[in-house]
Amino acid sequence: KDLSDTIPALKALGLPVVVDHMGRTDAAAGINTAGFQSLLRAIDEGWCWAKLSGAHRLSRRAPDYPDARPFHEALVSANPERLVWGGDWPHPRVEGEMPDAGHLLDLFYEWTPDAATRHRILVDNPARLYGFPN
């Protein structure tokens, strides 16, 4: 809910920024909230990263979190070059049902049907972001 106010301050830092949990917008509010839209712009502009993680932090509709899928898809559409995936294991401070990390990875594959995009998000982007050697 605070992303629209926070994003400009983060950009001003001039440092690499990774926003976790797809921005952690309440899925019930939808993708058109000011905060999530500001995250999409930051991703599209290419100065910010987002982690495709924490569907269970957006949605209470376990185990498939269908109302979190539009957030995932919007981020992938905005700029797959600025996304990384994470399972959020061991799920600290989880609210509601404990998610299954393997199922979250299955959802990532389902929600990201293009193999080249999946490889970019799972392999290429983290290597670039975190400076992993080739």
Image: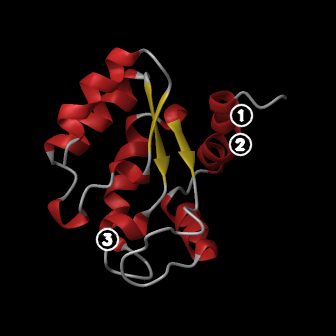
The residues bearing labels 3 and 1 have C-alpha atoms spaced at a distance of 29 Å
Q: Which mark is residue 123?
A: 2
Q: Residue at x 44, y 82 (%)?
A: 63
Up the image or down, 57 lies above or below 25; here it is below
Q: Residue at x 38, y 74 (%)?
A: 65
Q: Which mark is residue 127?
A: 1
Query: Local crowd at mark 2 within 10 Å, few (<14), some, or many (≥20)?
Result: some
The residues bearing labels 2 and 1 have C-alpha atoms spaced at a distance of 6 Å
Q: Which mark is residue 62?
A: none
Q: Nearer the viewer, residue 58 or 31?
A: 58
- Amino acid type, mark 2: Val
Q: Residue at x 58, y 51 (%)?
A: 114
- Amino acid type, mark 3: Ser
- SS category of the residue bearing label 1: helix
Of badges 2 and 3, nearer the viewer stands 3
- Amino acid type, mark 1: Ala
Q: Percent position (x, y) of residue 91?
A: 52, 69
Quadrant of the rendering where the C terminus is positioned? top right
Q: Which mark is residue 59?
A: 3
Marks 2,1: beta carbons within 8 A? yes
Residue 48 vs residue 117: left or right?
A: left
Q: Nearer the viewer, residue 62 or 77?
A: 62
Query: Local crowd at mark 3 within 10 Å, few (<14), some, or many (≥20)?
Result: many
Q: Residue at x 54, y 62 (%)?
A: 88
Q: How is the image coloured?
A: secondary structure
